[in-house]
Image (spheres, rainbow, N blue to C red):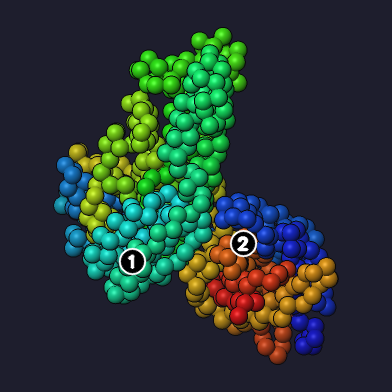
Amino acid sequence: MPSDSAHRRRRFIVGSNGTTGSGVERNRRPASALSCFASRASVAAALAMLVAIADLGATTRQGEAEADGPRDLVLDRVEVQRVVVDLVAEQGGRPVLDLEAGELRVYVDGTEVEILGFSPPPASGREGSSPARASAPTAAGDDGETLTDDAAVAGPQTLVLFLDELHMKPVHRKRVLKQARGIADELIDAGGRVTVVAFDGKLKLLLPPSSDKKALRDVLDEAMDSTSIPMMASLADPARAIAVVHQRMEDETQEKSGGSPLGARPSGTDPCVDIGGLARTSAQQAAAATDQSIGGLRLLVGTLGRYPGRKSLLYVSDGVPLVPGMEVYTYAIEMCDGTAARQGLPNAVDTQEFGGGRFSRWDPRAARTEMLDFDTTRQWREIAAYANAQQVSIYPIQATGLQTLDAAGVSNVRTTQSFAQAALGNPRDSLFLIADETGGEAFFDTNRFGDALVEAASDAEVGYQITFEPLSGIEPGAHEIRVEVDRPGVQLRHRKSFTSRTAASRLVDLAVSALVFGRGDNPLGVRLDVGEPVATGGGGSKVDITVRVPLSSLALVPVGEDRLGRFTVAVGGRQSNGRYLPVGFKQIDVRASEVDQATQSFEYEIELPYRSDAIEVSVAVRDDVGGVEALSLASIGGS
């Protein structure tokens, strides 16, 4: 047996700029390292790193395998992902509660797959089943072989009330929350547990998952009092941008030189020369706010996978533009391409009348193509597939209330009907898409927000759950789901896609989840020991964190005279300003003969760059052989 001083303790050094430092195994040969943290200015940047980190980790592990020689094949695991699909069946606007598994067909990327689990709606009072061959119709009067299957219904429903403050006016938020407060007890009764999260560029957990009705009422009361408007929300407001374009057009068309506070041009000059730049700047600001909201939603959805059972996310906003900037682009184009002029709108022109663009630096006709550069359809579909993988259905609720085409315009600005249609539809299109793709339902044109909240929360009572396993060899990424029903006249609402993910990517989400909800489950008994900040020169400092994993908690495979295992570590962080840092991960091989004989724990050190601000650190550990995951939290700095 090796002496205590010869046990393996690995060291993981992280560069302050996100680059990899040199790694050192104490008393052993050098090992490669992977960056955990890098300073970023926004949640969106951190999310971009989350997407890239899996590929980086795979490259690192491949390099280690080449350096260390072939790994023991006995440790390689093939994980089968079981997909759960929540499904609501309706006929004539009423729920259908008596469907059988044999009436349904499930297709993944166009290929039929076998239904392995089937659970009828709780409201039907029937028991769940796992048909031996659910994809084949059963004979009349013969339900076929049924087996108990708890995989489809793995826990109570969790309701998530998500307030997008980047895309919601305070007066609208207060109106929705006031009604939500009035039906708080019903939300708890329908959902089992409710969590409330706000987003203003940073995720703010107002209430962790709870069944406490008084706590929910208190949180909603407090949230109603908030009147703050994030700066980005003001900059991205299309009404503000349209008013600026309108004023510019009015000033530019004045015949009296110098009559405009913005500097009018001589009469006869093309007034649209600067309009394209204004439209483009507005679209860029709107796109930045939209990217932030998509990033915040992605971050929140990723944290929900740790909770078993169905998750219903009630997404409250005034609407999020599918094409950021479409409103101001449409207004500018119609004011300059002759459309508005033919309808008699004041200050409208046709740039072709100015010498075929001789004086104009902007072609309003070509701008329609430029506008589509800001289309976010792909990002919303990716979020939907990701939510489906976490068993999250999204129910958007537009907080503007009942709207008409006239209300979609801008005060004191005359517009065309086609503009009003674009202004009304663009903020809704993204909400409809995300609801349709995740099997939820979007609520528009209503002032009865309490009814919408209860209806969304009650969907689980009339919903079926079916489970299937994708075909072997399926590639990681998004895949299409299609469910068909044999019964005529029945319409199905279900999630349309799912994302096939690796165990490492799920571990990354767990690390972030611990930071968002402030708690971690630790069945492996992982311990974190945080050292004191140590100066490194040049005004910088570092902190060492030691991760100790008890050998008795890991599944080990006998190989020769030794026992081997493998676990993966993911490390995430959140700064005191609420910004989340990118998550890094590393896979580590374990030999029982090399653990600390005194503690009987495998030790792994992480060296983090540290500045003066406090950092909350989460460490997620997965036993890759046993499949058990653990979360642990630690704080660095602060009072």
Q: Position of residue 190 (x, y in %)?
A: 25, 64
In the depicted structure, whether residue 3 falls above or below residue 232: below
Q: Residue at x 32, y 72 (%)?
A: 218
Q: Pointer 1: what residue?
A: 220
Which residue type carries mark 2?
A: Leu
Q: Crowdedness of circle 1 by 10 Å Cα count: few (<14), some, many (20+)?
A: many
Alpha carbons under labels 1 and 2: distance apart: 29 Å
Q: Is residue 205 visible?
A: yes
Task: Examine the rendered structure and indicate whether residue 27 appears above or below residue 146.
Answer: below
Question: What is the three-letter code of the residue carrying label 1?
Answer: Leu
What kind of element bears circle 1? helix
Q: Position of residue 213 (x, y in %)?
A: 28, 73
| Kind of element beneath mark 2 | strand
Task: Say left or right for 161 vs 512.
Answer: left
Is 599 displayed left or right of 138 in the figure?
right
What is the number of the mark on residue 581?
2
**In front of the other: 150 or 463:** 463
Residue shown at 37% from the left, 47% from the top: 318
